[in-house]
Image: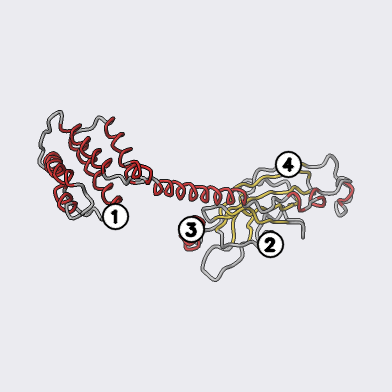
Amino acid sequence: MKSFLKILKYLLFTILIVGLIFAVIFFRVWQNNERPGLVNATWDEDEVLLGHSRDLSITIRAPWHRDVITARPVGHPDFLPPVKDKYLFAKGGLDFSGYRLWHYRIPLVATDTTSLEGKAITLPIKRTGRIGPNSVTVPLPELTINLPESIPPDPENPQDFLNEEPPLSEEFNDSVIPKDQTNYLLIIAVIFILLGAVVFFVRRQKTINATPPWERALSKLDRLAHDDTAPEKFFSQLTDILKQYTAERYLVPARAKTSSEFIRDLKRLSDIPEEHLNKLPPLARLADGVKFAGLTPDDNDAPRSQNLVRSFVVDTTPKSDTETEDA
């Protein structure tokens, strides 16, 4: 039960940190209140017959707090009107940076062969209570408007030269608009990864806590014996092992700054064997001299000091019940 509560605590802490990060990101996006930007704009085909329509697909990227309520353009070239009530839009995915994609599909009818160079349409954005842009301008991509092979004798009735097939916009349906593309699978994966990381670190900490201090100290001494380090670093690590072991073994704080101060604190403990209380002070003086006074130790000082600390750890390791009975 305690392990579960600890995992839950770490998980909630992780969620809180992640939530605060996203809160800051989304607040900055809201604060800047930038104009939505164009991602892409393409025609379903590059050519169209005069009098027919082509569908214009548009994707914009807008701040998370800006909404779209209609795809009806508020501005367009006079010779390229939208097909009434055939324009569609759909809400796209919200990314982690605080921006959302919006997708449009707008059928436009070509009524003139004028070039689209420099032309644009303007799409409305829902107003907010703040001063800011309420529209996005979309430059129109290139579209070739072709004349039909024959012109009807009666220009007032152009139905004769229109194709029998209905304009593409009449075959339009919601399926061509991408649905909300928020990557929920990615969000779920991130949550599981965070949860897995929390469980891993909690179990790792539990394993470390379950390992007795004497075993950890002996393991560190073994690694130190194989490290080729400078004397200052060696004696610093050696005394750190001694301080940490004593603090964990006897549940006393290792507040001493120098090894000599640490030995004085150690003498106040009644459980320390007398022989070690006599052997440790020379080690402390040697370590302080090497670390703080630039003393150069002899070749035998390092292994002798390490053996002394190892002997101290072994002699102060609690005996099991079996070993006590055998003794």
Q: Nearer the viewer, mark 4 or mark 1?
A: 1
Spatial CA distance of label 1 from label 3 is: 22 Å
Q: Name the residue under label 2.
A: 70
Q: Residue 225, located in which quarter of the rendered image?
A: top left
Amino acid at circle 4 = Glu
Amino acid at circle 1 = Leu
Compare marks 4 and 3 and give the one earlier in the sequence.
Answer: 3
Spatial CA distance of label 4 from label 2 is: 24 Å
Pointer 3 local density, CA inside 10 Å: few below 14, some 14–19, many at least 20: few
In the image, what residue occupies the spot 26% across and 42% down?
315
Pointer 4 local density, CA inside 10 Å: few below 14, some 14–19, many at least 20: few
In the image, what residue occupies the spot 55% across and 52% down?
191
Q: Mark 4 points at which residue?
A: 45
Could you tell me residue 96's position as x and y percent?
A: 53, 53
Amino acid at circle 3 = Lys
Spatial CA distance of label 4 from label 3 is: 64 Å
Q: Nearer the viewer, residue 19 or 290?
A: 290
Q: Nearer the viewer, mark 3 or mark 2?
A: 3
Using the image, tell me which numbered label, if any, was put on residue 251: 1
Could you tell me residue 222's position as x and y percent?
A: 30, 34
Q: Name the residue under label 3.
A: 2
Pointer 2 local density, CA inside 10 Å: few below 14, some 14–19, many at least 20: some
